[in-house]
Amino acid sequence: RLGIVHDAGGWGLFKALYGTAFRAPSVYERAYIVPSIGYGNPTLLPEKMRSFEVSWEKRFSLQSRLTATAYHFDIERMVTTDSAGLAVNGTPVRANGLEIEYEQQWSNGSRLRTGYSVQYAADETRRLDNSPRHMAKLNLAVPAGLPGLMAGIEGQWIAARLGNAGSENLAPYGLANVNLSYAPAGSQWALGLSIYNLFDRRHDAAHGSASRTFYDMPQQPRTWVATLEYRF
């Protein structure tokens, strides 16, 4: 990974980044073969990825920051499955995107983080499954009256996606999560209560391939999580 960073003073911070990575096929992808399913493929080659990013960061004060990042990815030999369910190295994948994020903090401890991203990812034949074009998020945390008690709300919106090898559409969805955390100053313990998918919205994730007819998997409904943390 290589990077060039330039501090332009009042114009902000500029970055240019280049990176490469690879992933060797897993044992499952290379060796899983039973009489009725021939998923494994011992001739699989490692996946290879290259990334290019340019980023601009502007601080309006010590408590606020705006960041914009444009990126491009090249992925070669991505492991996928063919029409017979055999693990194979697929065609090259290209992805382009833009992310914008804003952060703000206040003297009373409140924090705001919001962001939006637009992207397009496709191989040589079509747009990739489960790859939304648009995503947005918002996270706000504020003091809740008692010292050490914070309340937070998070919103997420995911645009429509493709499924079942591009032949089906999955609907867009929005989710809301809430969180209460209590960590008294100077103590070694903290309490937390979170509610995920507050309004119990049904939402699906794309799954499967050309050899599997199912493509939408229902995700987690409203879920309550309580936590107790002790630091030592």
Image: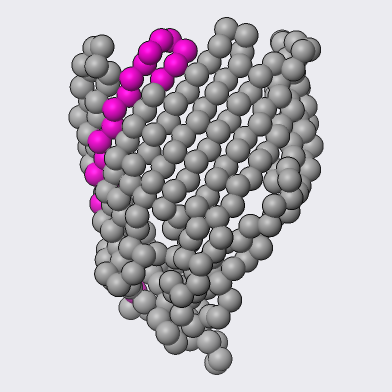
Residue range in magenta is 44-65
The answer to whether residue 204 is left or right of residue 79 is right
In the rendered view, tell whether residue 95 sits above or below residue 91.
above
How many numbered dots are placed on residues in this image?
Answer: 0
Asked if residue 207 is positioned above or below residue 144 in the image, the reply reads below
Residue 185 appears left or right of 96:
right
Coloring applied to the structure: one colour
On screen, residue 75 above or below 200 = below
Reply yes or no: does residue 63 show up in magenta.
Answer: yes
- Comparing 217 with 156, the one in front is 156
**Residue at the image position 53 percent from the left and 87 percent from the top:** 37
Q: Residue at x 44, y 87 (%)?
A: 84
Q: Position of residue 156 (x, y in %)?
A: 57, 42
> Is residue 63 visible from the viewing direction of this image?
yes
Q: State whether the magenta stretch is mostly helix, strand or loop.
A: strand
Q: Is residue 115 above or below residue 35?
A: above
Q: Residue at x 55, y 23 (%)?
A: 112
User: Looking at the image, which is closer to me, 56 or 42?
Assistant: 56
Question: Which residue is located at x 59 percent, y 68 percent?
Answer: 216
Please state the horizontal and vertical placement of residue 121, each as a whole percent of the image.
Answer: 35, 58
Q: Nearer the viewer, residue 134 or 216?
A: 134
State the quadrant of the C terminus: top right
Q: Is residue 84 a member of the stretch shown in magenta? A: no
x and y, in percent, of residue 145 in the image: 77, 13
